[in-house]
Image: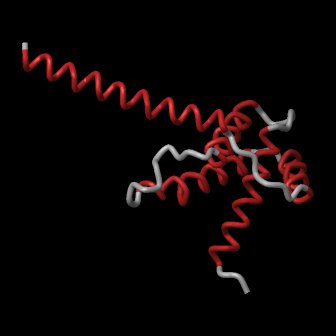
């Protein structure tokens, strides 16, 4: 018998694949499609928005944000799209795809924040010196 957290993790993986296929279905409304792409892209990205080595906050996205995003997308999907996506996810037991574009966007966000912080700090230093 598997522990509850392993069952939960397997269910999340299955639902993530469902959301991935639903986001690519042409019958999915655009708003839901964008949300599904964002949730699936973030969950499949090899880089987290909040790195895991930051205590508590680093795990918050994995334990709370991703499941909430999946739940919201699954609630908003039309039933026919949801059934087709679940069928595809059940048929294909492939590895989940990695989203390198989302990883690149997250890296750019962190670099932008670092550049803005550096700009602000240098401005303060020069303001104090001048």
- Identify the residue at horizontal 78%, vertical 33% (top origin): 29
Q: Position of residue 115 (x, y in %)?
A: 36, 25
The answer to whether 80 appears left or right of 103 in the picture is right
Query: Which picture quadrant has residue 95?
Result: bottom right
Nearer-the-camera pick, 31 or 104: 104
Task: Report the front residue among 45 and 68.
Answer: 45
Q: Residue at x 68, y 45 (%)?
A: 40
Instruction: State how the image is colored.
Output: secondary structure
Count of numbered circles on the image: 0
Which of the image's four quarters has the C terminus? Answer: top left
| Residue, far bottom | 1
Q: Is residue 38 above or below residue 88?
A: above
**In the picture provided, is 52 more to the left or to the right than 44?**
left
Residue 112 quadrant: top left
Q: Is residue 122 above or below residue 73?
A: above
Q: Residue at x 62, y 49 (%)?
A: 69
- What is the x, y in percent for residue 120? 25, 24
- Quarter of the image for the N terminus: give it: bottom right
Q: Is residue 87 above or below residue 116?
A: below
Q: Residue at x 65, y 33 (%)?
A: 101
Q: Position of residue 62 (x, y in %)?
A: 55, 56
Please tell me which residue lies in front, 36 or 99. Answer: 99
Q: Looking at the image, is 124 positioned above or below residue 13?
A: above
Q: x, y (%) of residue 80?
A: 89, 47
């Amino acid at each position: 018998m598997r522990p509850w957290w392993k069952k939960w993790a397997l269910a999340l993986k299955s639902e993530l694949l469902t959301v991935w296929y639903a986001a690519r279905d042409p019958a999915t409304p655009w708003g839901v499609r964008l949300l599904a792409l964002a949730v699936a892209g973030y969950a499949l990205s090899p880089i987290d928005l909040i790195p895991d080595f930051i205590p508590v906050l680093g795990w918050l996205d994995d334990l709370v944000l991703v499941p909430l995003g999946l739940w919201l997308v699954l609630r908003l999907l039309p039933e026919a799209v949801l059934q087709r996506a679940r069928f595809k996810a059940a048929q294909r037991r492939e590895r989940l795809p990695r989203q390198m574009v989302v990883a690149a966007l997250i890296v750019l966000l962190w670099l932008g924040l670092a550049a803005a912080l550096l700009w602000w700090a240098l401005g303060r230093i020069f303001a104090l010196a001048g």
